[in-house]
Amino acid sequence: MRFRSSALYFAVAIAASAAALTLTFAAPSPFGGDIPASEAAPAPEFQNIDNWLNSQPLKLSELRGKVVLVDFWTYTCINCLNHLPYVKDWNQKYKDKGLVVVGVHTPEFAFEKSTKNVKDAIERLQIRHAVAQDNSYGTWKAFRNQYWPAVYLIDKQGKIVYSHFGEGSYGTTEKKIQALLAEPAPATTTATPSGT
């Protein structure tokens, strides 16, 4: 009997440890912040976007050389609405300096899937940056995101180097945007004509 209890306790401990490790590596840190260069991973492409609003369809691979701010939001989330003025301000201040802001609208409720409702919210909230309508959570899942609002900063090489979840840290986020914009553009390779 004592053996079974010990074996059961051991099995539960192993399962809990495995679950903790899976959560650690499967999801972004709940705290966000700077991501060390050695851990920075390429940003996933936008996936399964239903509609692009305020923009033609964008591909992250075509935005190399620019700093990209990806903002996961939804128009009925009070935290997103409190956060939105900062995102709009960053877009206005830095769009001509190499920042591309993409709001990924991922609905929490069924009525938020309506393109008309999203368009009405964009107009009411005076959003000028690109908005990707992510009704199927394709991009949300690709980023392994779990929060509204969530900001991901992608450097000029296309790697996620910073994240922030929820409201706050606006000064820190803006300083990171400025630092990323000041970095040199990635070197491009020029093909040499054959025979030279």
Image (cartoon, grey):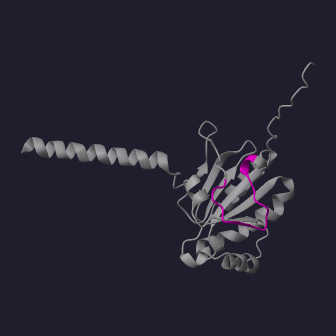
Residue 121, compared with residue 162, is above or below; it is below
User: On the rendered image, what quadrant is the N terminus found in?
Assistant: top left
Which residue is at 57% across, 62% downward?
Answer: 137
Which residue is at 71% across, 44% downward?
Answer: 158
User: On the rendered image, what quadrant is the C terminus found in?
Assistant: top right
Residue 74 at x, y = what percent?
A: 62, 71
Residue 114 belongs to the span the image colors magenta: no
Which residues are the magenta region?
A: 46-61
Front position in the image: 151 or 133 = 133
Farthest right residue in view? 196
Residue 146 at x, y = what percent?
A: 52, 60
Which residue is at 48% across, 45% downward?
Answer: 25
Farthest front residue in view? 194
Q: Is residue 26 left or right of residue 59?
A: left
Residue 89, compared with residue 31, is above or below; it is below
Total label count? 0
Residue 27, compared with residue 73, is above or below; it is above
The majority secondary structure of the magenta stretch comes to loop
Farthest left residue in view? 1
Q: Is residue 142 left or right of residue 171?
A: left
Residue 157 at x, y = what percent?
A: 73, 41
Front position in the image: 69 or 177 = 69
Front position in the image: 169 or 145 = 145
Which residue is at 64% across, 58% downward?
Answer: 151
Residue 42 at x, y = what percent?
A: 65, 43
Residue 56 belongs to the span the image colors magenta: yes
The answer to which image quadrant residue 14 occupies is top left
